[in-house]
Image (spheres, rainbow, N blue to C red):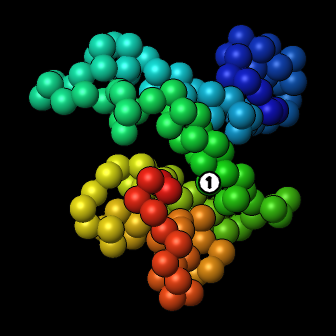
Amino acid sequence: MVSDDDSKTFLSVVKLYSEVKVEKLNCVGQVQKRIGKHLLNLKARTKGKLDDRLRIEGRGHLTENKIKTLQKYYGFAIRQNALKTGNPTGKEVDVAIYSMKTNIIAISHHFVKSQDLAKHHRFFPRRESSRCKWKQDAATGTATYKDDDC
């Protein structure tokens, strides 16, 4: 059952089809919305400042546009690593989950500004088709990356 995280509906379906095992899968769009909601709640709860008094919002920090971009890339990471086969083996599932986690970590690191560019971009693959322009440049020998591309 694909759902939008409505627990009451899921419980009703399980009760209705008691002789069949019903598995709940959340919609990727719902997962994307949830991460954005949590980030917006973090900004509201902390009033834009962390415990160490550093800002998390404003220019160059966690803005609504950055949150929307994070949501979009988070969805890409999930969709890109979704299993295509109807009956995957345990190894296929493990590889897909590992790839998904690596992509999500790469996205998180990509949005954190760092002086060490290799560290900042290390989780993205070094190839021409990489979503990371710095890694594209490393693979092709070009210099199109600008610091504000992230």
Residue at the image point whose x is 67% and y is 68% from the top: 92
Count up the numbered dots.
1
Q: Position of residue 13 (x, y in %)?
A: 82, 20
Residue that appears at 48% across and 68% down: 145
Q: Does residue 93 appear to the left or right of 61 in the view shown?
A: right
Question: The N terminus appears in which quarter of the rendering?
Answer: top right
Question: Farthest residue toward the left?
Answer: 52
Q: Residue at x 37, y 39 (%)?
A: 60
71 over 89 or under it: above or below: above
User: What SS does tag 1 mark?
Assistant: helix
- Which of the two residues, 144 or 62, is positioned nearer the viewer here? 144
Residue 39 point in image, percent of width and height: 45, 27
Query: Which residue matches tag 1?
Result: 77
Residues 144 and 111: in front is: 144
Q: Which residue occupies 35% across, 49% down?
A: 112
Q: Is residue 53 left or right of residue 102?
A: left
Q: Nearer the viewer, residue 114 or 22?
A: 114
Q: Amino acid at mark 1?
A: Ala
Percent coordinates x, y for residue 12 in the rendering: 79, 13
Q: Is residue 123 visible?
A: no
Residue 110 found in image quarter: bottom left
Q: Residues within 10 Å of mark 1 (few under 14, many from 20)?
A: many
Q: Answer yes or no: is residue 148 visible.
A: yes
Residue 67 horizontal/vertical position (percent): 51, 33
